[in-house]
Image (cartoon, coloured by chain):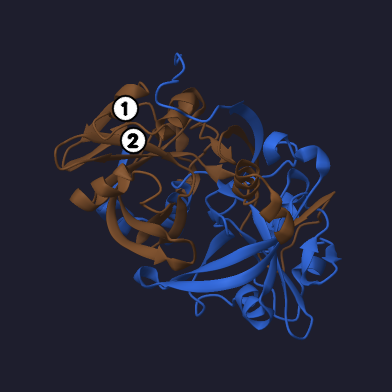
Chain colours: A blue, B brown
Amino acid sequence: MIYFSQSDFNQMKRIERANLINSVSGLKPANLIGSISGRKKTNLAIFSSVIHLGSDPPLLAFNLRPSDEVPRHTLENILENGQYTINHVNNQIAEKAHFTSAKFGREISEFNACQLTEEYITGFEAPFVKESHIKLGMTFVESIPIKMNNTQLIIGRIEHVIVPKNMLGGENNLDLSLSQSVAISGLQTYYSVQKLAQYPYARPNQLPDFH
Amino acid sequence: MIYFSQSDFNQMKRIERANLINSVSGLKPANLIGSISGRKKTNLAIFSSVIHLGSDPPLLAFNLRPSDEVPRHTLENILENGQYTINHVNNQIAEKAHFTSAKFGREISEFNACQLTEEYITGFEAPFVKESHIKLGMTFVESIPIKMNNTQLIIGRIEHVIVPKNMLGGENNLDLSLSQSVAISGLQTYYSVQKLAQYPYARPNQLPDFH
């Protein structure tokens, strides 16, 4: 076993510390966030920080680093027109999705640079990713500043869910192994998934014989 | 393809809506959060909402539902002594971890009920999960209310990281397939992972030939 504590973090190289701390929270969802500027320039960026906030109303959030550190085209677009899409990265597009994280100029669309295809639905401006299987149309709700490290939590409401029929199971459970949705750890490692088990709703008086 | 929008969400049964909306954010990390009360009663609960907030300082967060909806022993304990642990769920303990979500009374420790083993390190009060491979000792930093749906974001600082030597790769990247860390979708489905690829840091002028 290796034990790291505060003084070890402080002595690590910047990249060693970033890798370790970005890995320890566990598997992260790989999502592409699509957006469009007022001048109709599209943008696509990979995010690993999307979380479920609640089902009624249907809210998701993601975390954004300080705007002075990296250009934040995604946020600029979201604030301009209030819309964005969240698209699951799958095994087939993991490499293309990863390279959307390169710092392209504002005039370059990552859809073109990384060979992914824009897709639109009626009445919704932001671009979806055609190659993705599970796609969400979102409207911006609120940005919550996290003062402790100068990041912000971007909260959005799910307006549209687009899923292939065969990936939707009983009681609307999505099978993320059929959609070949991908998980991330750290900054550059991608994982494919296989279904391990589906357990029943947990009740204190109905515990299984654990083995 | 199936297209769901707001009016469809409204017409779904509560469980269908919860399953769908809890699945669409993508794969979620399965973590057990360990805590202890002022009277030394331990508590263990599974969470799928842990996210990375930043590496310097090393911060993670998780989302908590309204306290009037379900008893929140985890939060009570965290507020009492400021400490908690985050422990990766792995393939071997997924079933036990799932059943910590049953609504046990305050006097019952999920460590006992679900046959998981408490483990302690010197100078840190909160219990770790012995069967977990990747374990974090956390101190509470701040709770941020999310008014939109009456949840809260609990932010903590990583004080200790405990990992087996063989799971720590070059530049401190953790291999979450070696730790057999598990992902969740929806409320009850668990996935095991396999490493798909590790891509280099992305630069606009060094794009691969995508295939």
Q: Where on the picture, by quarter, is residue A47? A: bottom right
- Marks 1/2 in contact by CB < 8 Å: the verdict is yes
Q: Is residue B3 visible?
A: yes
Residue depicted at 36% across the width and 51% down the height:
B68
Letter of the chain that mark 1 sits on in the rendering? B
Residue depicted at 16% across the width and 36% down the height:
B40
- Element carrying mark 2: strand
Q: Is residue A193 above or below residue A60?
A: above
| Residue A192 image offset from top left, x and y in percent | 66, 39
Q: Earlier in the sequence, mark 1 or mark 2?
A: 2
Q: Where on the picture, by quarter, is residue A168? A: top right
Q: Is residue B188 above or below residue B7?
A: above
- Element carrying mark 1: helix
Between the C-alphas of marks 1 and 2, the distance is 6 Å
Q: Is residue A88 visible?
A: no
Residue depicted at 84% across the width and 62% down the height:
A117
Question: For the view shown, which residue lies furthest in the bottom direction?
Answer: A39
**Mark 1 lies on residue:** B111
| Residue A18 image offset from top left, x and y in percent | 45, 57
Along the viewing direction, whichever of A54 and B142 lies nearer the viewer: A54
Dot 2 crowding, Cα within 10 Å, few <14, some 14–19, many 20+: many
- Inspect the image, locate mark 2, and give the three-letter code of the amino acid beneath it: Leu
Left or right of B129? Residue A209 is: right
| Residue B163 image offset from top left, x and y in percent | 38, 37
Along the viewing direction, whichever of A161 and A42 lies nearer the viewer: A161
